[in-house]
Image (cartoon, rainbow, N blue to C red):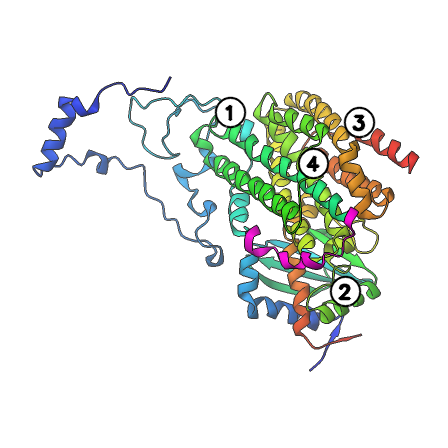
Amino acid sequence: MAYIAPKDYSQDPEIVARVMKVMAGELDLSWMRDTAGAIHARPSQPHYGLTMDDINQGPYGPDRIPEIVRHNFSMAPRGAILPPGLPSLGYRLNRKSEVWSDLAGRLFEEGKSRRWAPAHDVPWDALETSGLSEPQQIAMRQLCTELVSIGLVCADVPARWVWQMNQEFHEIKYLLCVQMIDATRIAEAFRKRALVGRGGLGVDCKELGELLKMVFESGTYPCASASMNLVLFSWVQGLAGQLGATARNRADAYLAVRLAQDATRFVAYGVDHVRQLLRARPAEQESLNGHLDAIENGLVGWLGARETIEPLAILAGGVDPVIRSHARTADLHFVRCAAAGLGDRQGRSPIPRFLSLLGGHA
Amino acid sequence: MPIRFPSIEFFQALQQRTKDAHDVFEKLGYCDTSFGVCVGDQLYGIRFEVYDCVEVRAGGDPAGLDFVLSAPPTVWNDMVASIRKHGGAGIDHTLNTLTHLGDVVRVEYQDAEGHDKFYRFMATIQEFFDQAQHLDVVMG
């Protein structure tokens, strides 16, 4: 059922009387007296323009957000005067540590600044002489198909949570909106790569679907953030590195570098978000680690799926480079987990055992 | 006048190219990182702010850098030669290809976030090197 306003404004005599006074030139101007306070916001570094950090002063900055927001559940922007009777929008994420990262504002600005347009920026004509054999072409389209799924679901994940976040955390909400655009661009770019020329999509990978479902259905926002930003995008970054290293033309090289670039902003937020959460609430470490155990199990399923490992091996010219690349990605992933405050995950993660299995049969 | 590679003059010339080709770097977006290029045992420190390279220097403490790209001189020579031959790094000489498995160009780092800036800004860093196509370089 839709929300209904508490009164019929068009029939409210009090409002009509007030409007008539304004029309007669009798202005109240009480809203002009009740300002929240002036600041002197200017670009601190002219090359950057006016940044989020430049305007985050005094009552408008994030430093004064309490750990638990109880004073504002409305649509009012942070720092505005809150008259009595504002409607609650029913936010569920009202703890700063559940969502916060000091990096978010900068990553938001960076994401907009480093935008690219697949339609025009990818040198698509380079694919006319792609340098790929027919099996490699099919393998590339298969991996593109999986990246489209990843992009689509990773646009959905922030969309599932952003409207539940209190408006006081607007930097995070801004960033999540950029994440949706970035993830959508991944889906767009790799769908175009799969279909360009005499192309076609590949086979949907069931194990990838299971992984993405686990990420999407994470029960809390910290679990969703850790699983998507910290885990999944670490491996998307690694996949981008593999695609770049095996690229035989400028279009695929371009796509790989941009995929890595965009994936790494997700990773940067994930590391900083989890770190700030665990500094504020160390007891959350075990629940996050427990969730990541399940996510990494799903990750192993995806990496080991025929639809994933076989095209990677075909593009790389064998399974050895794939194993080495996965090992490098795993090393970086565990370093990031430790940096985020999750401790040493190698002992409990299924990833090292999976890599040992691959190495033993290579 | 030819510029020798590797040398501080080479990196200073690339720094100037980020200003001469400002539109190219502006389109790539913000790039905020301090990184190192280690040619053999010679370290060059490079700092980017916003769209421009704002500082290059020889030597310094690698611990203060986000990451260091380290390789023998022959690897760097081949990359610069490829850039000059193809008008930008050839497909086998991109930073992504050379660093991916860590056995041609090593990405050395103190922490994961420093390392990740290499990926966040790789397109800009690749373009920085690709500007060598406009220089008269002699391998030294």
Which residue position holds label 3? Answer: A350
Which residue position holds label 4? Answer: A339
Residue B29 appears in the rendering:
no
Label 2: which secondary element? helix
Taking A279 as reference, is A23 left or right? left
Taking A82 as reference, is B7 left or right? right
Amino acid beneath label 3: Pro
Looking at the image, is mark 3 or mark 4 nearer the viewer?
Answer: 3
Circle nearer the N terminus (1, 4): 1
Mark 3 and mark 1 on one chain: yes
Q: Nearer the viewer, residue A88 or A209?
A: A209
Most extreme residue toward the front, as rendered?
A: A198
> Which numbered tag is attached to residue B68?
none
Task: Return the x and y of residue A13 as percentages of the image width and height.
Answer: 13, 22
Amino acid beneath label 2: Met
Q: Disc 1 sits on a residue from what chain? A: A
Looking at the image, is mark 2 or mark 4 nearer the viewer?
Answer: 2
Q: Nearer the viewer, residue A227 or A49?
A: A227
Is A132 included in the stretch rendered in magenta?
Answer: yes
Mark 2 and mark 3 on one chain: no
Circle nearer the N terminus (3, 1): 1
Task: Return the x and y of residue B70 as percentages of the image width and height.
Answer: 79, 57
Label 4: which secondary element? helix
Residue plotted at (59% across, 53% down):
B32
Which residue position holds label 1? Answer: A95
Dot 1 and dot 4 residues touching (CB under 8 Å) = no
Q: Which residues are magenta?
A: A117-135
Is A46 included in the stretch rendered in magenta?
Answer: no
Quadrant location of the N terminus of chain A in the rendered image = top left
